[in-house]
């Protein structure tokens, strides 16, 4: 999976949001708020990644076990899939 073109990560203070730009804003009206973990995963999706690669990246960056990482990655994927932000 890879994030769709036309979506940008912005930081506002200590918060991170994803906003649609250009043509993407025709289909997506809103913003997605991300925490630090979700920001890491979003940045990983600049390139084609599978769920296992996202879990590995999260485990490398944060001191979490595989079960926790898988749970967080699954939750993140569901959120951005439902918002239409990824190509699979």
Image (cartoon, grey):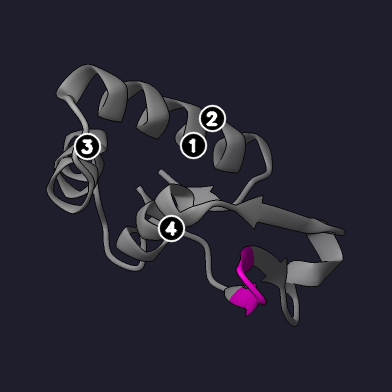
Whether tag 3 and tag 2 are in contact, CB under 8 A, the answer is no
The quadrant in which the C terminus is found is top left
Q: Quadrant of residue 71?
A: top left
> Magenta stretch containing residue 32, yes or no?
no
Between residues 7 and 18, which one lies in front from this camera angle? 18
Q: Is residue 22 above or below residue 29?
A: below
Earlier residue among tags 3 and 4? 4
Disc 3/disc 4 C-alpha distance (Å): 12 Å
Q: Residue at x 14, y 41 (%)?
A: 56
Magenta-drawn segment: 10-16
Q: Which numbered disc covers residue 55?
A: 3
- The picture places residue 72, in percent across and down from the top left corner, at 40, 30
Nearest to the eye among marks 2 and 1: give it: 1
Q: Which numbered disc covers residue 42?
A: 4
SS at mark 4 in the image: helix
Nearest to the eye among marks 3 and 2: give it: 3
């Amino acid at each position: 999976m890879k994030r769709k073109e036309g979506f940008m990560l912005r930081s506002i203070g200590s918060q991170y949001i994803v906003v649609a730009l250009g043509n993407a804003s025709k289909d997506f009206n809103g913003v997605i708020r991300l925490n630090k973990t979700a920001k890491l995963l979003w940045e990983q999706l600049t390139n084609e990644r599978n769920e296992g690669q996202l879990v590995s990246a999260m485990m490398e960056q944060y001191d979490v076990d595989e079960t926790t990482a898988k749970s967080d990655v699954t939750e993140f994927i569901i959120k951005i899939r439902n918002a239409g932000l990824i190509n699979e």
